[in-house]
């Protein structure tokens, strides 16, 4: 009978599997899925014994599996992985919010994308709004660390909602993203120029979808000049 690997061997095996996935060393999607699922099985067992050591690894693997399945258009299976990832990150964030709230927000954004693919727009928007609320909380507590992240999430979600045919819902998010990045760029142009350009591009996408070209020309935030542009 094969010897059951101890906790250290199991952890090393799972870590090696995920490194191969992340480095693109597996040629076929089927191989990546097999590696992710084996790593998840290992981390489930380890987390049951030592959650403080391995729950984070389990959540990371579940997130990776969800992304892989989504890329393969296997959204129903991706949903299961992403819902579990959100559940694990909720548990981690409840114990250590400073360390895991941002991860929870990112997991919620992934979940929202998959819910939208499964034609569940109301559930998708609920998850994404929760993610934004988390980033608002983080930015209020640590603006230097999270304000730019909040703006990026707002800008990206604005474009995402527009692509789903919801530009009216997207518009206030896109405008807020521009406002935040404009303020950040005024204080630190070199650091935030790219973020401002990204937010402005997202706002243009939203306004164009609304058929408001004249408003696009009179955007509430000025475009970078030739000297300030990316």
Image: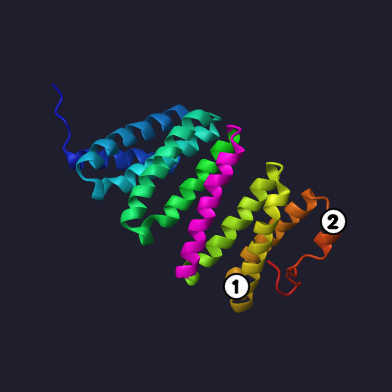
For residue 78, which numbered disc appears in the image?
none
- The quadrant in which the N terminus is found is top left
**Which region of the structure is painted magenta?**
118-142
Q: Is the residue marked by circle 2 packed among few (<14), some (14-19), or many (20+) residues within 10 Å?
A: few
- The quadrant in which the C terminus is found is bottom right
Label 2: element kind: helix
* Main SS category, magenta section: helix
> Where is residue 176 shown, x and y percent of the image?
65, 63
On whether residue 136 falls in the magenta region, the answer is: yes
Residue 28 seen from this side: no
> Where is residue 133 shown, x and y percent of the image?
51, 57
Identified at 30% across, 33% down, the residue is 41
Gap between marks 1 and 2 measured at Cα: 26 Å
- Tell which of 20 and 80 is nearer to you: 80
Q: Determine whether 208 is above or below 180 in the image.
A: above
Identified at 69% across, 43% down, the residue is 163
Label 1: element kind: helix
> Which residue has dot 1 on it?
184
> Which residue has dot 2 on it?
213
Q: Is residue 93 left or right of residue 76?
A: left
Q: Residue furthest top?
A: 1
């Amino acid at each position: 009978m094969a010897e059951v690997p101890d906790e250290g061997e199991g952890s090393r095996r799972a870590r090696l599997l995920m490194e191969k996935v992340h480095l693109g060393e597996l040629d076929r999607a089927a191989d990546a899925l097999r590696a992710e699922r084996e790593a998840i099985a290992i981390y489930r067992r380890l987390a049951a014994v030592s959650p403080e050591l391995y729950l984070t690894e389990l959540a990371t693997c579940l997130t990776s599996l969800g992304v892989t399945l989504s890329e393969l258009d296997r959204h129903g299976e991706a949903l299961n992985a992403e819902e579990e990832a959100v559940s694990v990150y909720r548990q981690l964030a409840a114990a250590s919010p400073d360390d895991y709230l941002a991860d929870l927000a990112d997991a919620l954004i992934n979940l929202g994308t998959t819910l939208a693919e499964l034609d569940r727009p109301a559930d998708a928007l609920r998850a994404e709004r929760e993610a934004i609320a988390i980033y608002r909380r983080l930015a209020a507590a640590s603006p230097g660390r999270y304000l730019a992240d909040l703006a990026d999430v707002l800008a990206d979600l604005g474009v995402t909602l527009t692509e789903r045919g919801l530009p009216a819902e997207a518009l206030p998010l896109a405008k807020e993203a521009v406002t935040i990045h404009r303020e950040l760029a005024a204080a630190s142009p070199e650091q935030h120029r790219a973020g401002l350009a990204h937010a402005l591009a997202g706002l243009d996408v939203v306004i164009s979808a609304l058929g408001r070209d004249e408003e696009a020309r009179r955007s509430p935030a000025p475009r970078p000049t030739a000297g300030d542009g990316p």
